[in-house]
Amino acid sequence: MSANATLPRKDLFDLPEGVIYLDGNSLGPLPRAVPAHLAEVVTAQWGGHLIKGWNEDDWMGQPGRVGDLVARLIGAPPGSVMMGDTLSIKVYQALSAALAMRPDRRVVLSDNGNFPTDLYIADGLLRHLDRGHELRVVDPEAVEGAITEEVAAVMITQVDYRSGRMHEMERITKAAHRAGAVMIWDLAHSAGAVPVDLAGSGCEFAVGCTYKYLNGGPGAPAFIYIRPDLAGEAQPALAGWMGHDAPFAFDLDYRPAPGIERMRVGTPPVLQMSALEAAMSVWEGIDMADLRAASVALSERFIAGVEAACPDLRLASPRDPSSRGSQVSFAFDHGYAAMQALIARGVIGDFRAPDIMRFGFTPLYLDADDIDRAVGVLAEVMDKRLWDHPEYRRANRVT
Amino acid sequence: MSANATLPRKDLFDLPEGVIYLDGNSLGPLPRAVPAHLAEVVTAQWGGHLIKGWNEDDWMGQPGRVGDLVARLIGAPPGSVMMGDTLSIKVYQALSAALAMRPDRRVVLSDNGNFPTDLYIADGLLRHLDRGHELRVVDPEAVEGAITEEVAAVMITQVDYRSGRMHEMERITKAAHRAGAVMIWDLAHSAGAVPVDLAGSGCEFAVGCTYKYLNGGPGAPAFIYIRPDLAGEAQPALAGWMGHDAPFAFDLDYRPAPGIERMRVGTPPVLQMSALEAAMSVWEGIDMADLRAASVALSERFIAGVEAACPDLRLASPRDPSSRGSQVSFAFDHGYAAMQALIARGVIGDFRAPDIMRFGFTPLYLDADDIDRAVGVLAEVMDKRLWDHPEYRRANRVT
């Protein structure tokens, strides 16, 4: 057993001087390994090897190779995760394949804490199929009770993007399977944020993105997981040439690759994926249990500090850390303006309508001192009502 | 009227010393503007601005902004082209929307010179819809005659990836419209290669990729065009949040954006798209008619040279340049080994089974002297039967 890496590892990130970045749940910061690696891929590989890069630099194998790096962090075996496209596309693929596994059922169950694009994609797919399917959207707390034998697929995001509320993966997956439904997890706010045991959960599909806690950069590719025993029978809705059993045979007929490779669609984004591949190096030696412990400690410290110093803010996340992902939200009527004032002072979080101030906790590059400083700045913003100060309002274009 | 740029513009490309690159029809070489711009986006924008890059650096507007640069080269008005995803995904979107426009028709017409992924995607879509559609694939010469009133959509690639044979866009579009069919053009081998007049053709949809003649780099994003009068009614099959009328309202219900924006799906690949955006600068001042004239001159020179010097090679492209795109193919039984020997000597083309040696002509970075030298090397390879020489076979792993 190798020694675990210590947290934080601030030296691996290029964060602007003086900034405390609490928005890694939206877009992770730049890992220092990225610029040189990406420059090498652009200049030496693309520029120098030209078309030969597909083989010499194994661009072709990159989506699976990077998939294995992600797999380790989400409890998936090597060869079960494929990178590519966007999370929206991967949701479409997973849900299409799930419905094909339950042709006699007509309900897709989700919750209203899901990220909207998952619901849009599901709704679009069901209208497209036009076979009388229903997208049934319930409150997050009602999901388990709503899993009936009508349900073809349960499709939910584990960690709510607004509140940070976290579903119990094993319990809901078991409930889905008891009712004979296929389980699809969206790990957008889980991968790299909380320990995930996909294999242990037994779920059929999982999807996620890599520009949040995995720090892959703006527009980094998504991933899809299929439980290994099902990968050979999952029907790829988007039957692109890269998922063909022999892409370079240029057959006129489609024949899916034997395993997870069939979830590839078109030509992979080599440059974008190379940034991600370099970014994944920050995870070497990190044990997700250690990361989770650090994340909970930072979050608890933040909540205690804010509640002591900012009585106007109301905790909008579960108080029990075991029911939270790696973010904390506070509700405040003037949250948008307050967040702008906070950002102007170097503490970067974000805002989600109508009144949610979000803060992400990422132990790879945050420590207790950062949290205390962030609380101090937030307290000053609130105490001086900076969010209501005309100068701030002008500077931050608050209207 | 501004002066046109002169061709070639070799100084704008970073080509390896001594290489003659005749494979820009597969992957364009590195424009010199890319590395510095991409490094700036990575370090100053992502690294420095973090989440604020979406607004401060207008990452959000990039897919439309780059789309306008592509639009100019394919005869499309500003605001009618959107970048994103891969060509396979864009084919799926275009064909889905086309079928929704002709709900009472059940035939999709294509030809067997189409790139396989278009056929795979179409076949997958029709199986997915399961409404009795037929994908009818005819010989390229038979397309026009096969456009009957059963046909919902004609979906063909203008320039054949193997032979370079080029369909007449205006004529086939007219035939499709006479029969009441929707016309979809795949411009993978047309954009940046030949003059295209999308608006003049009246076609409903066009799609294409940008890593070939547009030099956007490996995995550069695709594009989709919708005729402006139809953009507001085209049904997006992949209803992702970036195509929503108000993505950041996080509504639970999908409401498509009013125009071409609705063809956006997920979070755009900012880094990959930034490489493309910089690469598009090589087109400033280029008139596509000038480019076409230079392309024809280079291709004719190559054909004449090869036919004079290499009697074993048989022209596998149309002899009439007006029926060809910007590539020339020769058939040869030992084409694979011969191409390997050619590449080992610095002349890079490629090979497509069973016996096609492909050569792309890209006047942005090729001149008559390059062509003459390429012909000379090819003649030597053929004359000395280098492709059959044990040393070459070992070095190039020809088995």
Image (cartoon, coloured by chain):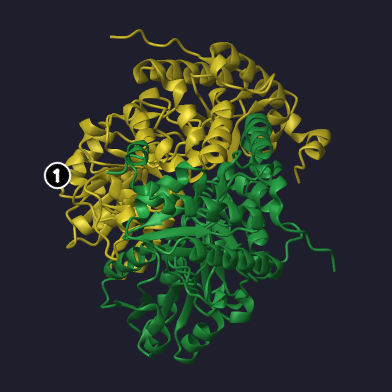
Chain colours: A green, B yellow
Query: Chain letter of disc 1?
Result: B
Residue B271 in view here: yes
Rendered-image quadrant of the C terminus of chain A: top left
Task: Out of A378 and A207, give the one closest to the viewer.
Answer: A378
Q: What residue type is labelled 1?
A: Arg
A131 relative position to A21: left or right: left
Residue A258 in view here: no
View extreme (front): residue: A384
Task: Out of B378 and A336, give the one closest to the viewer.
Answer: A336
In the rendered view, would you say B350 is above or below B148? Answer: above
Q: Position of residue A17 (x, y in %)?
A: 61, 38
In the rendered view, would you say A196 is above or below A84? Answer: below
Task: Write the residue at 55% across / 46% down.
Answer: A217
Q: Position of residue B5 (x, y in %)?
A: 42, 11
Q: Quadrant of residue B144?
A: top left
Task: Write the residue at 82% across / 36% down.
Answer: B390
Q: Position of residue A205 (x, y in %)?
A: 52, 73
